[in-house]
Amino acid sequence: MTNLDAEQALENRTMRLFADLGWATANAWYEAFDAQQASASRPYLVKRIARDLLASLLTEKLVLDWRKHQQSRAAVCLTIADTLYDHLPDSYTAEHCDQKRDDVYYHIYTNYHGAGQSLYTAA
């Protein structure tokens, strides 16, 4: 398998996993990571990071009433920051990571209520 084939296989797998989460969720997340910037680097990698971050937050951090507790909000923000700084491609500068951290946190705060409840599951 060539490198290009491996990248395409990962892209296909990522798209299937995004489909499992629901396209509204996946598209909103990909946009939060700035699709144009992601396309300039490695979009499959950015999509995978977005998917893994969302899965981690949904299973570990977005508990019932997480928005009401400062410690829970801080844990969500720290998880987002750690993921972005550790895993985004080099085409994302520190300033860009800061902006994406804020964008993703805002998206999470306004759309995910905790305990499996979100704007996307309410529809």
Image (cartoon, rainbow, N blue to C red):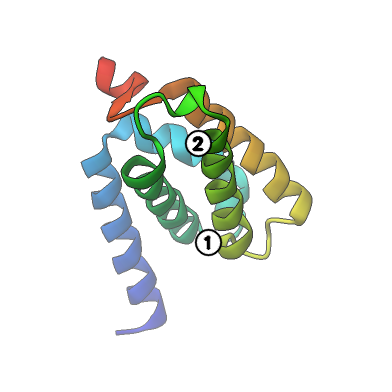
Q: Residue 104: percent from the left, percent from the top?
A: 56, 37
Q: Which mark is residue 5?
A: none
Q: Quadrant of the N terminus?
A: bottom left
Find disc 2 in the rendering and name its residue: 72
- 49 vs 123: above or below: below
Q: Earlier in the sequence, mark 2 or mark 1?
A: 1
Q: In the image shown, does 77 or 119 lie closer to the viewer?
A: 77
Name the kind of residue labelled 2 in the image: Ser
Q: Residue 21: percent from the left, percent from the top?
A: 26, 40
SS class, disc 1:
loop
Binning the other alpha carbons within 10 Å of mark 1 as few (below 14), some (14 to 19) or many (20 upward) gives: some
SS class, disc 2:
helix
**Image point (58%, 59%), residue name:** 88
Residue furthest right as drawn? 95
Q: Quadrant of the C terminus?
A: top left
Q: CA distance from mark 2 to mark 1?
A: 31 Å
**Image point (33%, 65%), residue name:** 10
Name the kind of residue labelled 1 in the image: Arg
Mark 2 vs mark 1, foreground winner is 2
Query: Is there a contact, CB below 8 Å, between mark 2 and mark 1?
Result: no
- 62 vs 111: above or below: below
- 24 vs 30: above or below: above
Residue furthest bottom as drawn? 1
Binning the other alpha carbons within 10 Å of mark 2 as few (below 14), some (14 to 19) or many (20 upward) gives: some
Q: Residue 35: percent from the left, percent from the top?
A: 55, 43
Q: How many marks?
A: 2
**Image point (46%, 38%), residue name:** 29
Res 91 → quadrant: bottom right
Find disc 1 in the rendering and name its residue: 42
- 82 vs 18: above or below: below
Q: Residue 61: percent from the left, percent from the top?
A: 41, 42
**Image point (68%, 50%), residue name:** 97
